[in-house]
Image: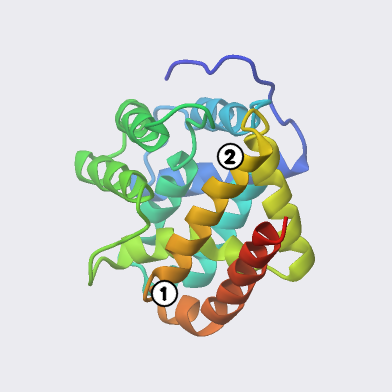
């Protein structure tokens, strides 16, 4: 697995917890096989998630998505494969570059094959990562539903947390002029609000959907008033 550049290891207690979660998940998908050592892959991924251009797509986002997958695990066909997909879904992230999801999927294919993950699980992880381009899983795609709902659950945060999320997204796109950002962000919000549903799992639909729509509507109103 090739090292990422321009980064540093988080090296804190949160990073240690994430390394433990990675090891447990990888070993579960590998049916307990201990070879090769899973930790260098965790170190590489955590370094990627800690790159300096990130403000929202950080190790905190990764941890939050993993926590939400735990909440939704009963709805998934293979929760551990979904957890691996979470590790890779924004592993390659440059706000000024397209095809981040495709690059992340290719990284997953290469790294997980090297890490001894069975080929069918590697293919499923890559498919799930590519699905985050649209967050639109097909009916019956329970693993896709769980990953997409976990990734979008930030939209259902409380008011303060949602405001922090919106500010972090703006910081990631600091290179975009204010007017252009407002227009682009408003278009994203309108597209989301136009979807028949933001969340596909029963938990997401019942618990997250109402608050998420309220948050999106409020942000859109604020942008429109600027």
Q: Secondary structure at mark 2?
A: helix
**Viewer-proximal residue, 111 or 142?**
142
The residue carrying pointer 1 sits among few (fewer than 14), some (14 to 19) or many (20 or more) residues within 10 Å by Cα, namely few
Residue at the disc numbered 2: 180
Left or right of 138 in this view: 56? right
Image-quadrant location for residue 199: bottom left
Q: Name above or below for residue 61 compared with residue 150.
A: above
Cα distance in 3D space between marks 1 and 2: 41 Å
Q: Which mark is residue 38?
A: none
Q: Position of residue 39 (x, y in %)?
A: 54, 30
Is residue 19 in view from this perspective?
no
Residue at the disc numbered 1: 74
Residue lying at 43% horizontally and 43% vertically, measured from the top left: 26
Image-quadrant location for residue 157: bottom right
**Viewer-proximal residue, 35 or 67?**
67
Name the front one of labels 1 and 2.
2
Residue lying at 72% horizontally and 44% vertically, measured from the top left: 14
Left or right of 181 in this view: 128? left
Q: Position of residue 167 (x, y in %)?
A: 73, 48
Q: Position of residue 81 (x, y in %)?
A: 36, 52
Left or right of 17 in this view: 140? left
């Amino acid at each position: 697995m090739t090292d990422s550049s321009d980064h540093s290891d988080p090296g804190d207690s949160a990073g240690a917890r994430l390394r433990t979660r990675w090891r447990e998940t990888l070993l579960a998908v590998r049916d307990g096989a201990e070879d090769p050592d899973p930790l260098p892959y965790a170190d590489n991924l955590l370094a990627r998630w800690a790159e300096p251009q990130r403000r929202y797509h950080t190790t905190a986002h990764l941890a939050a998505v993993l926590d939400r997958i735990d909440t939704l695990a009963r709805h998934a066909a293979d929760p551990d494969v979904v957890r691996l997909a979470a590790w890779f879904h924004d592993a390659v992230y440059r706000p000024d570059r397209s095809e981040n999801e495709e690059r992340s999927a290719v990284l997953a294919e290469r790294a997980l094959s090297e890490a001894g993950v069975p080929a069918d699980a590697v293919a499923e992880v890559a498919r799930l990562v590519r699905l985050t381009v649209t967050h639109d899983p097909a009916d019956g795609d329970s693993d896709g539903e769980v990953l997409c709902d976990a990734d979008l659950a930030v939209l259902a945060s409380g008011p303060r947390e949602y405001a922090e999320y919106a500010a972090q997204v703006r910081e990631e796109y600091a290179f975009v002029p204010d007017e252009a950002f407002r227009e682009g962000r408003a278009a994203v919000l309108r597209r989301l609000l136009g979807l028949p549903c933001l969340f596909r799992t029963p938990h997401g639909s019942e618990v997250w959907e109402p608050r998420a729509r309220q948050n999106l509507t409020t942000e859109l109103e604020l942008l429109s008033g600027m």
